[in-house]
Image (cartoon, rainbow, N blue to C red):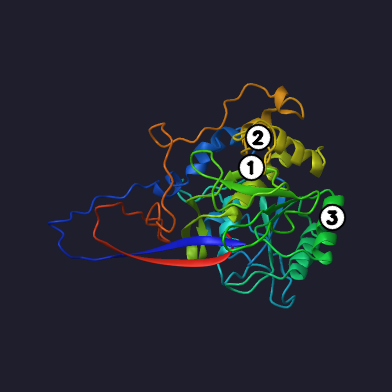
Amino acid sequence: MRSRTTLVSLVLIVVGLAQFPITPAAADSVRDRQWHLKTLQVAAAHKVTKGAGITVGVVDSGVAPHRDLSGNLLTGTDVLDRDAGGGNIDADGHGTEMAGLIAAHGKTDGDGVLGIAPDAKILPVRDSHPGQVGSSNVVANGITWAAANGAKVINVSSANAPSIALADASKAAVADDVVVVAGAGNKPEYLQFGYPAATPGVLAVGSSDRNNKHAPFSFTGKAVQLCAPGVGIVSTRLNDGYSVSDGTSSSTAIVSGAAALVRAKFPDLSAQEVIERLTSTATDIGPPGRDEECGFGVLNIVKALTATGQGSESVSPAPDATPASEGGQAAPDAPPGVPVAALVGGGVVVLGGLVALLAVFLRRRRHR
Protein backbone atom coordinates (compact mmCIF):
# COMPACT_ATOMS: atom_id res chain seq x y z
CA MET A 1 0.00 0.00 0.00
CA ARG A 2 2.74 2.34 -0.83
CA SER A 3 1.60 5.90 -0.94
CA ARG A 4 2.58 9.03 -2.70
CA THR A 5 6.31 9.64 -2.44
CA THR A 6 8.28 12.71 -3.44
CA LEU A 7 11.91 12.00 -4.29
CA VAL A 8 13.72 15.29 -4.81
CA SER A 9 16.81 15.55 -6.98
CA LEU A 10 18.71 18.83 -6.78
CA VAL A 11 20.94 20.13 -9.58
CA LEU A 12 22.85 23.32 -8.79
CA ILE A 13 23.15 25.80 -11.67
CA VAL A 14 26.10 28.15 -11.70
CA VAL A 15 24.20 31.13 -13.12
CA GLY A 16 23.56 34.65 -11.81
CA LEU A 17 25.48 34.23 -8.58
CA ALA A 18 25.52 37.98 -7.98
CA GLN A 19 21.74 38.10 -8.07
CA PHE A 20 21.24 34.84 -6.15
CA PRO A 21 24.01 34.46 -3.58
CA ILE A 22 24.41 30.95 -2.18
CA THR A 23 24.33 30.67 1.60
CA PRO A 24 25.78 27.72 3.53
CA ALA A 25 23.39 24.88 4.25
CA ALA A 26 22.80 23.82 7.84
CA ALA A 27 24.85 20.77 8.76
CA ASP A 28 21.96 19.13 10.59
CA SER A 29 19.29 19.88 8.01
CA VAL A 30 18.25 16.26 7.32
CA ARG A 31 17.67 15.52 11.00
CA ASP A 32 15.84 18.83 11.45
CA ARG A 33 13.36 17.88 8.75
CA GLN A 34 12.32 14.79 10.69
CA TRP A 35 9.55 16.71 12.42
CA HIS A 36 8.04 13.56 13.89
CA LEU A 37 11.06 13.12 16.18
CA LYS A 38 10.13 16.25 18.11
CA THR A 39 6.40 15.58 18.03
CA LEU A 40 6.93 12.08 19.46
CA GLN A 41 9.59 13.27 21.93
CA VAL A 42 11.98 10.63 20.65
CA ALA A 43 14.96 12.19 22.44
CA ALA A 44 13.19 11.60 25.76
CA ALA A 45 12.29 8.06 24.74
CA HIS A 46 15.92 7.30 23.89
CA LYS A 47 16.91 8.16 27.44
CA VAL A 48 14.90 5.09 28.43
CA THR A 49 15.89 2.70 25.62
CA LYS A 50 17.01 2.65 22.01
CA GLY A 51 15.77 -0.86 21.25
CA ALA A 52 18.94 -2.90 21.75
CA GLY A 53 18.41 -6.64 21.51
CA ILE A 54 15.26 -6.43 19.37
CA THR A 55 15.05 -7.61 15.75
CA VAL A 56 12.40 -6.08 13.50
CA GLY A 57 11.38 -7.97 10.37
CA VAL A 58 10.65 -5.66 7.42
CA VAL A 59 8.51 -7.53 4.88
CA ASP A 60 8.78 -5.22 1.90
CA SER A 61 10.76 -4.54 -1.28
CA GLY A 62 14.04 -5.44 0.41
CA VAL A 63 16.39 -3.12 2.30
CA ALA A 64 19.48 -1.75 0.58
CA PRO A 65 22.62 -0.92 2.57
CA HIS A 66 22.67 2.73 3.70
CA ARG A 67 25.27 4.51 5.78
CA ASP A 68 22.57 5.53 8.26
CA LEU A 69 21.76 1.83 8.79
CA SER A 70 25.31 0.47 8.89
CA GLY A 71 25.67 -2.22 11.54
CA ASN A 72 21.91 -2.53 12.01
CA LEU A 73 21.03 -4.40 8.82
CA LEU A 74 20.99 -8.20 8.79
CA THR A 75 21.02 -10.39 5.65
CA GLY A 76 17.40 -11.55 5.67
CA THR A 77 15.90 -13.38 2.72
CA ASP A 78 14.10 -13.01 -0.60
CA VAL A 79 10.81 -14.93 -0.57
CA LEU A 80 10.39 -14.30 -4.28
CA ASP A 81 13.68 -16.00 -5.07
CA ARG A 82 15.42 -17.87 -2.25
CA ASP A 83 18.57 -18.03 -4.40
CA ALA A 84 18.78 -14.25 -4.80
CA GLY A 85 21.18 -13.84 -1.89
CA GLY A 86 19.08 -12.37 0.90
CA GLY A 87 16.93 -9.33 1.47
CA ASN A 88 19.61 -6.66 0.97
CA ILE A 89 18.57 -5.93 -2.60
CA ASP A 90 16.02 -3.14 -3.01
CA ALA A 91 15.45 -1.87 -6.52
CA ASP A 92 12.39 0.07 -5.43
CA GLY A 93 13.43 1.99 -2.31
CA HIS A 94 10.28 1.49 -0.24
CA GLY A 95 11.72 -1.09 2.14
CA THR A 96 14.84 1.01 2.65
CA GLU A 97 12.63 3.95 3.67
CA MET A 98 10.75 1.82 6.19
CA ALA A 99 13.95 0.42 7.68
CA GLY A 100 15.33 3.92 8.19
CA LEU A 101 12.26 5.05 10.10
CA ILE A 102 12.55 2.02 12.34
CA ALA A 103 16.26 1.72 13.07
CA ALA A 104 18.50 4.28 11.33
CA HIS A 105 21.20 5.79 13.56
CA GLY A 106 22.26 8.64 11.29
CA LYS A 107 25.73 9.58 10.16
CA THR A 108 28.79 9.89 12.38
CA ASP A 109 28.47 13.68 12.51
CA GLY A 110 24.99 13.47 14.04
CA ASP A 111 23.19 14.34 10.82
CA GLY A 112 21.18 11.93 8.70
CA VAL A 113 18.04 9.99 9.50
CA LEU A 114 17.37 8.86 13.05
CA GLY A 115 15.02 5.93 13.54
CA ILE A 116 12.69 5.33 16.47
CA ALA A 117 14.77 2.34 17.65
CA PRO A 118 18.34 3.03 16.43
CA ASP A 119 19.87 0.14 18.37
CA ALA A 120 17.47 -2.46 16.97
CA LYS A 121 18.35 -4.81 14.11
CA ILE A 122 16.54 -4.93 10.77
CA LEU A 123 15.74 -8.33 9.24
CA PRO A 124 14.85 -7.58 5.60
CA VAL A 125 12.42 -9.85 3.77
CA ARG A 126 12.01 -9.02 0.09
CA ASP A 127 8.46 -9.77 -1.10
CA SER A 128 7.97 -7.68 -4.25
CA HIS A 129 9.36 -6.43 -7.54
CA PRO A 130 9.95 -2.70 -8.16
CA GLY A 131 6.73 -0.72 -8.42
CA GLN A 132 4.60 -3.65 -7.33
CA VAL A 133 3.05 -4.98 -4.16
CA GLY A 134 3.76 -8.52 -3.06
CA SER A 135 0.76 -10.81 -3.43
CA SER A 136 -1.08 -11.82 -0.26
CA ASN A 137 0.44 -15.30 -0.38
CA VAL A 138 3.98 -13.99 -0.85
CA VAL A 139 3.54 -11.52 2.01
CA ALA A 140 2.28 -14.44 4.09
CA ASN A 141 5.49 -16.34 3.31
CA GLY A 142 7.50 -13.30 4.36
CA ILE A 143 5.70 -13.01 7.69
CA THR A 144 6.19 -16.70 8.36
CA TRP A 145 9.91 -16.55 7.55
CA ALA A 146 10.51 -13.44 9.69
CA ALA A 147 8.70 -14.97 12.67
CA ALA A 148 10.75 -18.16 12.36
CA ASN A 149 14.05 -16.30 12.12
CA GLY A 150 14.15 -14.14 15.20
CA ALA A 151 11.90 -11.16 14.54
CA LYS A 152 10.11 -9.95 17.68
CA VAL A 153 8.32 -7.24 15.68
CA ILE A 154 7.24 -7.57 12.05
CA ASN A 155 6.53 -4.47 9.95
CA VAL A 156 4.16 -4.88 6.99
CA SER A 157 3.86 -1.51 5.26
CA SER A 158 1.53 -2.82 2.59
CA ALA A 159 -2.22 -3.24 2.17
CA ASN A 160 -3.23 -6.50 0.58
CA ALA A 161 -6.38 -8.38 -0.30
CA PRO A 162 -7.53 -10.91 2.26
CA SER A 163 -6.41 -14.49 1.82
CA ILE A 164 -6.42 -17.63 3.91
CA ALA A 165 -2.63 -17.85 3.71
CA LEU A 166 -2.15 -14.25 4.89
CA ALA A 167 -4.62 -14.68 7.75
CA ASP A 168 -3.01 -17.94 8.84
CA ALA A 169 0.52 -16.52 8.70
CA SER A 170 -0.46 -13.42 10.69
CA LYS A 171 -2.30 -15.41 13.34
CA ALA A 172 0.56 -17.89 13.63
CA ALA A 173 3.08 -15.08 14.14
CA VAL A 174 0.88 -13.53 16.82
CA ALA A 175 0.56 -16.94 18.49
CA ASP A 176 4.37 -17.15 18.45
CA ASP A 177 4.52 -13.91 20.48
CA VAL A 178 5.48 -11.61 17.61
CA VAL A 179 4.10 -8.07 17.37
CA VAL A 180 2.77 -7.75 13.82
CA VAL A 181 2.26 -4.12 12.75
CA ALA A 182 0.49 -3.33 9.47
CA GLY A 183 -0.90 -0.28 7.70
CA ALA A 184 -4.55 0.49 7.04
CA GLY A 185 -3.86 1.71 3.50
CA ASN A 186 -4.29 4.97 1.59
CA LYS A 187 -7.08 6.60 -0.32
CA PRO A 188 -7.64 6.71 -3.24
CA GLU A 189 -5.14 3.98 -4.12
CA TYR A 190 -7.20 1.36 -2.34
CA LEU A 191 -10.91 0.72 -2.13
CA GLN A 192 -10.99 -1.16 1.14
CA PHE A 193 -9.16 -1.53 4.42
CA GLY A 194 -5.93 -3.47 3.95
CA TYR A 195 -4.79 -6.87 5.19
CA PRO A 196 -3.10 -8.07 7.33
CA ALA A 197 -4.01 -4.90 9.26
CA ALA A 198 -7.63 -6.04 9.49
CA THR A 199 -6.63 -9.44 10.89
CA PRO A 200 -7.40 -9.91 14.61
CA GLY A 201 -4.28 -9.67 16.74
CA VAL A 202 -2.43 -7.44 14.26
CA LEU A 203 -1.77 -3.80 15.25
CA ALA A 204 -3.52 -1.75 12.55
CA VAL A 205 -2.04 1.71 11.97
CA GLY A 206 -3.37 4.87 10.35
CA SER A 207 -1.73 8.24 9.72
CA SER A 208 -1.81 11.57 11.54
CA ASP A 209 -0.55 14.93 10.31
CA ARG A 210 1.66 17.59 11.87
CA ASN A 211 -1.24 19.00 13.84
CA ASN A 212 -2.08 15.66 15.47
CA LYS A 213 -5.13 15.26 13.27
CA HIS A 214 -6.17 12.26 11.21
CA ALA A 215 -4.59 12.45 7.74
CA PRO A 216 -7.34 12.54 5.06
CA PHE A 217 -5.68 9.85 2.93
CA SER A 218 -5.57 7.33 5.77
CA PHE A 219 -8.20 4.57 5.62
CA THR A 220 -10.69 4.49 8.44
CA GLY A 221 -12.51 1.56 9.99
CA LYS A 222 -13.22 -0.36 13.16
CA ALA A 223 -9.90 -2.21 12.85
CA VAL A 224 -7.75 0.92 13.24
CA GLN A 225 -6.06 0.94 16.64
CA LEU A 226 -3.46 3.70 16.45
CA CYS A 227 -2.23 6.59 14.34
CA ALA A 228 1.30 7.89 13.93
CA PRO A 229 2.87 10.68 11.85
CA GLY A 230 2.55 10.00 8.14
CA VAL A 231 2.80 13.36 6.34
CA GLY A 232 6.07 14.75 5.01
CA ILE A 233 8.14 12.00 6.61
CA VAL A 234 11.87 12.08 5.84
CA SER A 235 13.74 8.77 5.69
CA THR A 236 16.57 6.86 4.07
CA ARG A 237 16.53 6.16 0.33
CA LEU A 238 18.60 4.21 -2.18
CA ASN A 239 22.23 5.16 -2.84
CA ASP A 240 22.66 6.78 0.59
CA GLY A 241 19.97 9.28 -0.31
CA TYR A 242 16.92 10.64 1.49
CA SER A 243 13.23 10.89 0.64
CA VAL A 244 10.07 12.68 1.73
CA SER A 245 6.88 10.60 1.82
CA ASP A 246 3.22 10.67 2.80
CA GLY A 247 1.32 7.55 3.75
CA THR A 248 0.37 4.90 6.24
CA SER A 249 3.52 2.99 5.31
CA SER A 250 5.63 5.52 7.19
CA SER A 251 3.21 5.55 10.12
CA THR A 252 3.42 1.77 10.33
CA ALA A 253 7.22 1.81 10.42
CA ILE A 254 7.22 4.45 13.16
CA VAL A 255 4.87 2.31 15.27
CA SER A 256 7.05 -0.76 14.62
CA GLY A 257 10.00 1.21 15.98
CA ALA A 258 7.96 2.11 19.05
CA ALA A 259 7.00 -1.55 19.53
CA ALA A 260 10.73 -2.42 19.45
CA LEU A 261 11.38 0.12 22.21
CA VAL A 262 8.61 -1.30 24.37
CA ARG A 263 9.86 -4.86 23.84
CA ALA A 264 13.37 -3.77 24.82
CA LYS A 265 12.17 -1.93 27.94
CA PHE A 266 9.68 -4.60 29.01
CA PRO A 267 11.07 -7.95 27.81
CA ASP A 268 8.56 -9.95 29.86
CA LEU A 269 5.51 -8.48 28.14
CA SER A 270 3.74 -10.66 25.59
CA ALA A 271 3.14 -9.36 22.08
CA GLN A 272 -0.47 -8.55 22.90
CA GLU A 273 0.58 -6.76 26.08
CA VAL A 274 2.98 -4.65 24.01
CA ILE A 275 0.08 -3.68 21.74
CA GLU A 276 -2.08 -2.93 24.78
CA ARG A 277 0.61 -0.67 26.22
CA LEU A 278 0.94 1.24 22.94
CA THR A 279 -2.81 1.69 22.53
CA SER A 280 -3.70 2.39 26.17
CA THR A 281 -1.13 5.18 26.40
CA ALA A 282 -2.06 6.81 23.07
CA THR A 283 -3.10 10.46 23.01
CA ASP A 284 -6.83 10.55 22.24
CA ILE A 285 -7.40 13.11 19.48
CA GLY A 286 -10.99 12.36 18.47
CA PRO A 287 -14.23 11.77 20.33
CA PRO A 288 -13.58 10.26 23.79
CA GLY A 289 -12.67 6.62 23.48
CA ARG A 290 -11.95 4.57 20.40
CA ASP A 291 -13.00 5.86 16.98
CA GLU A 292 -12.66 4.70 13.38
CA GLU A 293 -10.09 7.32 12.34
CA CYS A 294 -7.22 6.76 14.80
CA GLY A 295 -8.56 4.04 17.05
CA PHE A 296 -7.33 4.79 20.57
CA GLY A 297 -5.43 7.88 19.43
CA VAL A 298 -1.98 9.01 18.30
CA LEU A 299 1.17 7.17 19.35
CA ASN A 300 2.74 8.49 22.56
CA ILE A 301 6.09 6.72 22.90
CA VAL A 302 7.19 8.34 26.15
CA LYS A 303 4.01 7.31 27.96
CA ALA A 304 4.27 3.81 26.53
CA LEU A 305 7.75 3.52 28.05
CA THR A 306 7.01 5.19 31.39
CA ALA A 307 3.54 3.95 32.30
CA THR A 308 3.49 2.24 35.69
CA GLY A 309 0.66 -0.07 34.62
CA GLN A 310 -1.08 -1.31 31.51
CA GLY A 311 -3.71 1.40 31.42
CA SER A 312 -3.33 5.01 30.34
CA GLU A 313 -4.63 6.23 33.73
CA SER A 314 -1.56 4.95 35.55
CA VAL A 315 1.08 6.78 33.57
CA SER A 316 3.98 8.35 35.40
CA PRO A 317 4.37 12.09 34.78
CA ALA A 318 5.37 12.73 31.19
CA PRO A 319 4.16 15.52 28.90
CA ASP A 320 1.81 14.68 26.08
CA ALA A 321 3.27 14.58 22.60
CA THR A 322 2.45 17.89 20.95
CA PRO A 323 3.33 18.83 17.37
CA ALA A 324 5.68 21.77 17.24
CA SER A 325 7.91 23.58 14.84
CA GLU A 326 11.31 24.97 15.80
CA GLY A 327 9.60 27.97 17.35
CA GLY A 328 7.20 25.85 19.40
CA GLN A 329 4.18 26.52 17.18
CA ALA A 330 2.22 23.89 15.33
CA ALA A 331 3.89 23.29 11.98
CA PRO A 332 1.58 23.34 8.94
CA ASP A 333 1.56 20.41 6.58
CA ALA A 334 3.36 20.65 3.29
CA PRO A 335 0.99 20.50 0.30
CA PRO A 336 0.79 17.01 -1.26
CA GLY A 337 3.56 16.44 -3.76
CA VAL A 338 5.70 19.35 -2.50
CA PRO A 339 8.99 18.51 -0.78
CA VAL A 340 9.63 19.93 2.70
CA ALA A 341 13.30 20.16 1.79
CA ALA A 342 15.63 19.47 -1.08
CA LEU A 343 17.49 16.36 0.04
CA VAL A 344 20.37 14.69 -1.77
CA GLY A 345 22.44 11.62 -1.03
CA GLY A 346 25.34 13.60 0.44
CA GLY A 347 23.02 15.13 3.04
CA VAL A 348 23.26 18.65 1.56
CA VAL A 349 20.09 20.72 1.82
CA VAL A 350 19.79 23.96 -0.10
CA LEU A 351 16.89 26.10 1.10
CA GLY A 352 14.57 28.43 -0.79
CA GLY A 353 16.28 31.35 -2.49
CA LEU A 354 19.06 29.25 -4.03
CA VAL A 355 19.36 28.83 -7.73
CA ALA A 356 18.27 25.21 -8.19
CA LEU A 357 16.51 22.91 -10.55
CA LEU A 358 14.13 20.56 -8.74
CA ALA A 359 13.17 17.39 -10.56
CA VAL A 360 10.24 15.90 -8.70
CA PHE A 361 9.30 12.29 -9.31
CA LEU A 362 5.87 11.30 -8.05
CA ARG A 363 5.31 7.57 -7.84
CA ARG A 364 2.34 5.71 -6.47
CA ARG A 365 2.91 2.38 -4.90
CA ARG A 366 1.89 0.55 -1.85
CA HIS A 367 0.97 2.92 0.99
CA ARG A 368 4.27 4.65 1.76
Q: State how far apart marks 2 and 3 are (Cα).
A: 24 Å
Q: Which mark is residue 167?
A: none
Q: Which mark is residue 294?
A: 1
Between discs 2 and 3, the one toward the N terminus: 3
At 52% from the left and 57% from the top, the residue drawn is: 236
**Quick check: 285 above or below 148?**
above
Where does the C terminus fall, quadrant-wise?
bottom right
Is residue 103 shown to the viewer in this render? no
Q: Earlier in the sequence, mark 3 or mark 1?
A: 3
Say few, some or many: other residues with alpha carbon within 10 Å of mark 2 (under 14 / 14 to 19 / 20 or more): many
**SS assignment at label 2:** loop
Q: Are marks 2 and 1 in contact (CB under 8 Å)?
A: yes
Side of 216 relative to 261 (left or right): left
Of residues 4 and 81, the one nearer the viewer is: 4
Mark 1 burial class by Cα count in 10 Å: few <14, some 14-19, many 20+ = many
Tell me the residue that label 2 is attached to: 282
Q: As displayed, is residue 100 above or below residue 258?
A: below
Q: Give residue 46's position: percent from left, percent from top.
A: 59, 37
Q: Which residue is mark 3?
A: 171
Tell me: 222 left or right of 19.
right
Q: Quadrant of residue 98?
A: bottom right
Which dot, 2 or 1, sits closer to the camera?
Answer: 1
Q: Do we see residue 350 in this rendering?
A: yes
Asked if disc 3 and disc 1 are in contact, CB closer than 8 Å, the reply is no
Amino acid on which the number 3 mark rests in the picture: Lys
Q: Residues within 10 Å of mark 3 (few under 14, many from 20)?
A: many
Q: Of discs 3 and 1, which sits in the foreground? A: 1
Residue kind at label 1, given as amino acid type = Cys
Q: Secondary structure at mark 1?
A: loop
Look at the numbered discs 2 and 3 and tell me whether their residues touch, using CB distance below 8 Å: no
Depth check, front residue: 53 or 154:
154
